[in-house]
Amino acid sequence: MPDSGPLGSSPPQRPPTPRATVPDAPAPVVPDPPAPSAASGFLAALHPPVTVFDPLSPPAPASAVPHTPDTTASGSALRGTAAHGADSQGASLREVLRGPTGLGTTSLTLSARDELPLPQPVSAAPAPPAAGRAVPGLYHHDVPEPDPVRVEEVSRRIKQWAEDEVQLYPEEWEGQFDGFSVGRYMVGCHPDAPTVDHLMLATRLMVAENAVDDCYCEDHGGSPVGLGGRLLLAHTALDHVHTTDQYASAWQESLVSDAPRRAYRSAMDYFVRAATPSQADRFRHDMARLHMGYLAEAAWAQTGHVPEVWEYLAMRQFNNFRPCPTITDTVGGYELPADLHARPDMQRVIALAGNATTVVNDLYSYTKELDSPGLHLNLPVVIAQRERLSERDAYLKAVEVHNELQHSFEAAAAELAKACPLAPVLRFLRGVAAWVDGNHDWHRTNTYRYSLPDFW
C-alpha cells in the first residue's frame, strides 16, 4: 500500500488470542431498489462543490472560501493539462447525471423512493472541521466531517483487535498506531456503510495491508531483499493453500508466525464471512496486483533503478489503493454483480480512482519521505530526476498529473453511469467516488503524519 503507517510487529512471546474476543454481528444485506431508468441526481450524491486554490498563493481560510463550482477555479501554474477540458468534462458530467429534460421526461428521473438509502448520522451535532491544508492547486472535493461517534467506536474496536486478537505492535509503537487515525479514515471513506460492523471489515483490511507493507517493505524491518518469499507466504493468508494433510498443518502454523500474517488471516476471515464468494475473490485478485507492485518497486530499489515517469505510473497502478475502493459494495452491504464489475469501462473507473488517490499519497507524503534514509521513489522525485526539473517544478507537475487523472476518473464514471444506469452500478460509482474524496480528506487532515513542502 502507498506510504504505510508504522504499525510494527509483535513480541514473539505473546500468543494470539481467539478471534471471538471481538465478535461482529453478521453483515446485513441491503437489497437494491428498482433500477432507475436514468442517472439523475448522481452528481449531487457524488461530489459537493469545491474550490481549487491558486497554487502560487496561500489558500484563504475555510470560512472565507465561497462554495463555487469547481470549473471556475483558477491557478495559472497548474492549469495546463490538469485543467484542460475541465469545463467540458464538468458540464458533460452534470448533463449525464442530471438525467433527461423536456416535455414528457419527468417519469425518467429518480424519485425519492428510487434513491438508494443511506444510514442516518449517529451524532446529533456536526463535528467541527479538522485542521489541515490541502495541496494548493490540487483538484479535489470537500467532504462532510466524518461522524465522530462512529470514528470513536471504529477507533476503539480496531485498537482492541490489533492489541488483543493479532498482537500487531509492541507497546512502544502505540502512539504511532493512534496517529494513523484509521477510524477517521474509514468512516470518511465509507459514508454509506450501514453499521460499524461493516466499517470494521474495511478497517481491519486497511490495517493489515499497512502492517504487511511496513514490516515487509518499509520502516519497521522491511527490506527488498527476499521480499517475494515473504509476500507469497503472507498472501496465502488471503488465498489459502490446498495441499496434502502432511504439509497442511505446517502452513496453518505459519499463519500466526508474525504480525502481518496474523493480521491478514484475521481480517480476511471477518471479510469472507460478510462478503459473497465473488466479492472475496475480487479482493484476492486486487491484493495479488498490490503485491506485484510491491515486488516491482523492490526490484528497482535493489538495482538502484530510477524508472521513467511512465514506468513509475505503471508500477503505481498496481502498488496503489485499489483493494480499498474495490470493496465499497461489501462495506455498503450490497453486491455489484461480477459481470458488471468486470466491464472494461468499470475496470477503467476503478483503475483511475486508484491511480489518482495514489498520487495524492505521493504529494502529501513527499516531505515525510524526503526525511527517510536513502532514495524513496515518489512521483515528484521521479519527475525531477527523469525530466531534469527542480524539486518545486517537479512537485507542481505531479499535481498536474493528479488533476488530469482525477478529471479522467470523473469523466469515465459519468460515461459509465450513462451507459449502464443500473442501481448497483450507480451506487458503486458513488461509493468509489466517496472513497476517493475521503482518502484525500484523511491525507489533508492527518497533520500527525504529513506536512506540505514550502513551494508556494
Image (cartoon, rainbow, N blue to C red):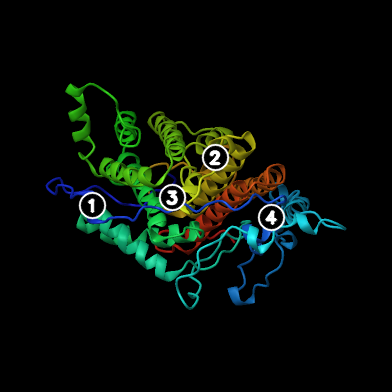
Measured along the vertical axis of the image, is residue 195 above or below residue 124?
above
Residue 292 is situated, as x and y percent measured from the top left of the image, at 43, 31
> Which residue has dot 4 on it?
77
Q: Considering only order in the chain, which callout, 1 or 3, is on the residue closer to the N terminus?
A: 1
Q: CA distance from mark 4 to mark 2?
A: 43 Å
Measured along the vertical axis of the image, is residue 289 above or below residue 38?
above
> Which residue is found at the position 68% from the left and 72% from the top?
66
The answer to whether the residues at label 3 and label 4 have Cβ atoms under 8 Å apart is: no
Q: Considering only order in the chain, which callout, 3 or 2, is on the residue closer to the N terminus?
A: 2
Q: Amino acid at mark 3?
A: Leu
Residue 25 in which image quadrant: bottom left
Residue 447 is situated, as x and y percent measured from the top left of the image, at 43, 64
Q: Amino acid at mark 1?
A: Ala
Judged by depth in the image, the label closer to the viewer, 4 or 2, is 2
Q: Dot 1: few (<14), some (14–19), or many (≥20) neighbours within 10 Å?
A: few
- Helix, strand or loop under label 2: loop
> Which residue has dot 2 on it?
337
Q: Considering only order in the chain, which callout, 4 or 3, is on the residue closer to the N terminus?
A: 4
Judged by depth in the image, the label closer to the viewer, 4 or 1, is 1
Q: Which residue sits furthest left? A: 13
- Helix, strand or loop under label 3: helix
> Which residue has dot 1 on it?
20
Residue 113 is situated, as x and y percent measured from the top left of the image, at 64, 61
